[in-house]
Image: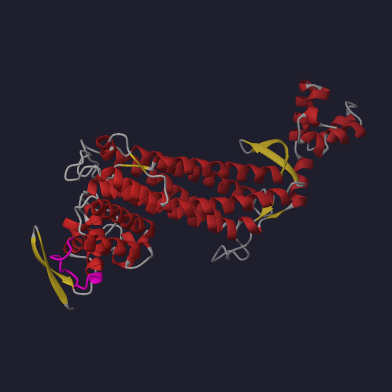
Amino acid sequence: MITRTEHDLLGDMDIPAQAWFGIQTQRALDNFDITGVPISHFPELIQALAMVKSAAAGANFELGVLPTHKAEAIIAACDDIVAGRLHDQFVVDLIQGGAGTSTNMNANEVIANLALEKLGHGKGQYQYLHPNDDVNRSQSTNDAYPTAVCVGVQFAARPLIDAIQNLNRALSAKAAEFADVVKMGRTQLQDAVPMTLGQEFEAFAVNLGEDIDRINEACALLCEVNLGGTAIGTGINTPARYQALAVRRLAEISGLPIVSAAHLVEATSDMGAFVFFSGILKRFAVKLGKICNDLRLLSSGPRTGLGEIMLPPMQPGSSIMPGKVNPVIPEAVNQTVYQVIASDLAVTLAAEAGQLQLNAMEPLIVYNLLNSMKMLGSACRMLETRCISGIQANREQCARHVDNSIGIITALVPHIGYANSSRIASTALNSGSTVRELVIAEGLLDEIQLDLLLSPQSMLAPLADIS
């Protein structure tokens, strides 16, 4: 392998000659092999890192501390990376020691070498443009990295929100399709009162749709960044006015309403916004998991379970039982949910582990936030296209359950009294007779009255709404 030699604090090291990264990235590659998931797995983070570096270069140029040719080369290199170039050169593992220094230096080195190319120099010729002195000027990992994370997480939230919206629309479409399917509602897995299958699916849609607003609210908290605070928030090694200029430029480049945090020392050490964001992801995951539990229950059987809906068959379900088809899509979503819940705990513990002016565990927070969003987005798309859109109602089974249920006695309580209703329910349960048969036999109501009171119009709406 053809190599080039680079030097840092610890000495010399050979780097692959064609690599766009440099010596500190290579050391990180050698040191950290934890997840097997490199930065390139999350392009939104790479784009955000490039935007931060571009904003810093622009501010440094405006303040006269970065020469024109260097600033232009750095900004052009950053533009290329935002557009998708050289993402495969962002190679360090997401989980790393050093509070994100390896990620920051991976970005600095790739940008520096790409800028050198634009200036007509070879890779590693840092005497002409340096990863630290030029690309990282007026920055520290401790402000550039968390700022990029704030931006990258918001970028990563967009496809998740799109996936939730599409899933929400699919559930709403099923709600309309099943609006006339009367079925039994259940509480504590016991028969309760009638409802429609459409109402059940509409509740699913509303339940998930609420969290789109919650995710947007969490994104708003990430618009406050500590860029310009450098090492611990004091702004050491930055020119006057740099912080305001860099933040303003980042807002323009990213298209996000980025603003400076009110107190940079606090913002440099605090992980509260990330904990909040992770909590929203967990909230959504829990809701999604509950819906998938319901889908598996409603489709159970198909002949000896509830069997009220039929999920689209995706694959044979057994190597030994012919004809068995399992609810594999909801099952896969449930497993995704468990992982997101576990990731939220990891984020919480990492945030709590911060010490004094910095949190060294931020890479774990970043990994879990980005991975949770990626998994949830994939799970939503899979659930929408491979399950929800193909669900069918078993209308006959739903009707049978309503006819055989004792729960419909609840609709008669205002007319025959609670005591009579309890006695009829107990007798029906023990004798196998239907509620209708017993009420008529005892002369409590006639058939015309029962037809009215046990009609969907009567059982599915408040009494005042019955016409």
Q: Work out whether 34 lies above or below 408.
A: below
Q: Position of residue 464 (x, y in %)?
A: 79, 27
Numbered range of the magenta stretch: 117-130
Name the colouring of the figure. Answer: secondary structure
Q: Nearer the viewer, residue 40 or 261?
A: 261
Q: Residue at x 43, y 55 (%)?
A: 374
Q: Nearer the viewer, residue 271 or 231?
A: 231
Q: Residue at x 78, y 38 (%)?
A: 432
Instruction: Please tell me whether residue 99 belongs to the stretch shown in magenta.
Output: no
* Residue 301 placement, left or right of 45: right
From this view, report whether residue 309 is shown above or below residue 226: below
Residue 226 in view, yes or no: yes
Asked if the stretch drawn in magenta spans residue 118, the answer is yes
Q: Quadrant of the N terminus?
A: bottom left
**x and y, in percent, of residue 321 in the image:** 58, 63
Please tell me whether the stretch drawn in magenta is mainly helix, strand or loop: loop
The quarter holding residue 345 reads top left
Residue lying at 32% horizontally and 51% vertically, measured from the top left: 148
x and y, in percent, of residue 222 in the image: 38, 43
* Residue 145 spot, x, y in % from top left: 28, 50
